[in-house]
Image (spheres, rainbow, N blue to C red):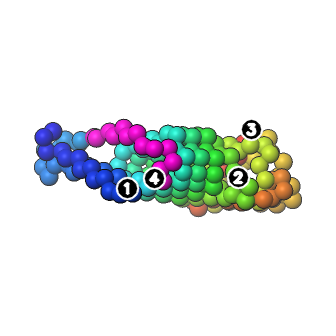
Amino acid sequence: MQEIEVNVLSMENEIYIETIQPQDTEYRQYQVDYEITLPKDLEIQLDSVNGNIILDSIYNDVTVYHMNGDVTLIEVIGSPLVDLINGDVTLIEVVGSTFVYLVNGDIESDVTLPLNGIIDLYMVNGSIDLYIPANTSAEFSAAVSIGDISISNLVLENEVRTSTSLSGSLGFGQGTIFLEIENAGNISVFGF
């Protein structure tokens, strides 16, 4: 334990935190959990390799680049961007344009889209569950190579449906919702 180091560097406009693992672990795995309290309006960029990430009560943009593990964002008023390789992404009470790019895992998101905002959820394998207010206004498009697309409690005008895609307009179409699973999985969209 003495060989694990945590470097904290505070600069004028950023805080940099790095965990340095021991060179010789003798087949042991080390986990370091951080609990950090920051000003709500601080713009956040988080670059991480392994482990789970939970961010709560952020009132600005959030960018997360992560390799392996789950990412959970709770009560974000701003535009989150999550770029993850393996793991699940959970977005709870997000108000803002939202971008998630995932290779393997699941996306579950509760997003209120602002006027002219964008929701862009893309993955290779897994499932997408999107919960949006029933009065959302956006051009809607969803596509999956292998799987199903379902929409519930929403009125989709000018609907165009094929076995692998669904598109149309929600409300006045004043934003954009784009959902895609490149390979296999299911897309479900629910109005609340």
Task: Give me the C-alpha separation between circle 4 and circle 3.
Answer: 29 Å
CB under 8 Å between callouts 2 and 1?
no
Identify the mark at residue 44; answer none if there is no mark.
4
Residue 20, visible in the rendered structure = yes
Residue 92 place in picture, x, y as percent: 58, 40
Q: Which residue is mark 1?
A: 14
Task: Give me the C-alpha separation between circle 2 and circle 1.
Answer: 28 Å
Does 21 appear in magenta?
A: no
Residue 13 place in picture, x, y as percent: 39, 57
| Disc 2 packing (10 Å; few <14; some 14–19; many ≥20) | some
Identify the mark at residue 192; answer none if there is no mark.
3
Identify the mark at residue 132; answer none if there is no mark.
none
Name the residue located 13 percent from the left edge and 45 percent from the top edge.
3
Quarter of the figure with residue 119: bottom right
Q: Of marks 2 and 1, which one's residue comes earlier in the chain?
A: 1
Q: Amino acid at mark 1?
A: Glu
Q: Nearer the viewer, mark 3 or mark 1?
A: 1
Q: Which residue is mark 2?
A: 114
Q: Amino acid at mark 2?
A: Pro
Locate the N terminus and report the quarter of the image it occupies: top left
Q: Which residues are magenta?
A: 31-44
Q: Nearer the viewer, mark 2 or mark 1?
A: 1
Q: Main secondary structure of the magenta part?
A: loop
Q: Of marks 4 and 2, which one's residue comes earlier in the chain?
A: 4
Q: What SS does tag 2 mark?
A: loop
Looking at the image, residue 147 lies above or below residue 32: below
Q: Amino acid at mark 4?
A: Ile
Q: What SS does tag 4 mark?
A: strand
Residue 106, visible in the rendered structure = no
Q: What SS does tag 1 mark?
A: loop
Q: Amino acid at mark 3?
A: Phe
